[in-house]
Amino acid sequence: MSAVYETIIGMEVHVELQTASKMFCRCPAHHFQVAPNRHICPVCTAQPGALPVINGRAVELTAMTGLALNCQVQPRSVFARKNYVYPDLPKGYQISQYELPLCTAGWVEVEGKRIGIERVHLEEDTGKLVHQGGLSLVDYNRAGVPLMEIVSDSSLRSAEEAYAYLVAIRQVVRYLGASSGDMEKGAMRCEANISVRPEGAQAFGTKVEIKNLNSFRAVRNAIAYETERQVRLLEEGGQVRQVTMGWDEEAGITRQQRSKETSEDYRYFPEPDLLPVVVDEAWQTRVRGLLPELPQAKAARFASQYGLSAQDTGVLVEDQEVAAYFEEAAALADPKLVSNWVTVELFRRLKEDGVQVGETKVKPQALAELIGLLKSGAINQPAAKEVFGVLWAEGGSPAPIVAARGLGQISDTGALEQAVSEILAANPDAVEKIRAGKDSAVKFLIGQVMKATRGKANPALVEELLRRQLAG
């Protein structure tokens, strides 16, 4: 009988910070879609005699992230040299933090479970290798870009939990403006450390690291595959070796790259060209004051203030721009109706056109006005959707669109009485079915009246008049 295994997962998430300059020099930090080796200087290409200078904004953003993840910001942290030889590492070592990181001992809540954060520290990014035919070229634009590393503890237990954890981390750094979190552009990358053990066992199994996972899909699939691979190996009487693996997206498997490095392999020692980073209580208080309302707090407030469901609040606070759009409209119209329109009609259009909420021509005030017209009975639901479509394409205000297109709802009883009488006379079979107890035929008759009035009739009034005439 096969044993039941438990998966143990720890995540190392690398986040490129959105600073104007690199970590230790004045070169622009932006490197996406920049011609190779344009944003470089003697410091980030390790020319003899060049000295690094710490980017204060990168320290600030890292501390803000640590605070948002409930970490302790250490009053004294130290940069070290992490030694390894790789073609895209110009110095032959990476300036990072090791023994004394900037932030320690935090946590983030993921689907009701606290995932521990061991450390949040600063380092510099490497360059990038470009393979062309039989050649490998090096682009140093990315070398020296501020890179924040967020290291979790080993409390994640499944690929799905790891996926949700990564989503939560990205949401936090985006809210802070620390990073775009765009994995497709390399602004956020991660490694997963995975081991398995028989359920109930106390000792950890042998850990395998999967490097450079660059999409949410890759994270989920790589962890799921590696878990299955380790379990299968143990079930067959084999042993898991501590190695570094890469994820082959096309084949859907992990492949061994090299044996796993340890801290001794990197030969860490304090960076002699940089002083320790010392931050006093006043500095920490100032940085704490820069924190915006964070996603979980915002979701709780939306539920309390606007009476929204957990599902709706979760969707609305996922993106900071969406949350701001919702609040602006909710200040002018029924919040629950605003939530419905944002999460259904607006989201549908955003997805279809591949745009962000800040790019839409449907301004929050216009959406609120549209909802007001609908709620007052000035227009009906089909007309509201038509107006929304015009707003999406052209922008503007709903009222003039309603007037220009003749979309006002007919709520005049006299006008509708005649339409209802004509529909009843033209559909005797439906009338007989209703009188025989088949009430579903009422919907058919309502539809016929709506068709006859070109969708302008007030559906509730139509039903009332139909039932009144049928009862007569």
Image: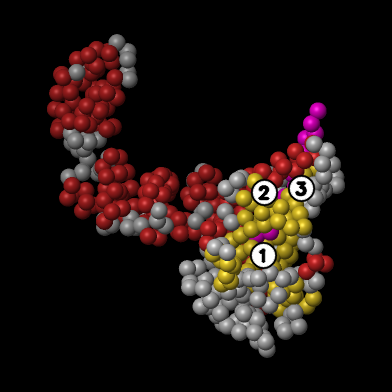
Circle 2 crowding by C-alpha within 10 Å: few under 14, some 14–19, many from 20? many
> What stretch of residues is rendered in magenta?
1-13
Q: Is residue 11 magenta?
A: yes
94, above or below 436, in the image: below
Give the amino acid type for the residue marked by disc 2 in the picture.
Thr
- Residue occupied by mark 1: 149
Residue named by callout 3: 195
Which residue matches tag 2? 254
Q: Residue at x 47, y 56 (%)?
A: 323
**Which of pointers 2 and 1 indicates the residue nearer the eye?**
2
Does residue 145 appear in this view? no
The residues bearing labels 2 and 3 have C-alpha atoms spaced at a distance of 14 Å
Q: Earlier in the sequence, mark 2 or mark 3?
A: 3
Residue displayed at 33% across by 55% down:
362
* Mark-to-mark CA distance, 1 and 3: 21 Å
Look at label 3 and name its amino acid. Ser
- Color theme of the render: secondary structure
Task: Kindly identify the amino acid type of the residue bearing the numbered disc 1.
Answer: Glu
Considering depth in this image, is 56 or 73 the residue closer to the camera?
56
Q: Secondary structure at mark 1?
A: strand
| Residue 93 seen by the camera | yes
Image coordinates for residue 226, horizontal then vertical, percent = 70, 45
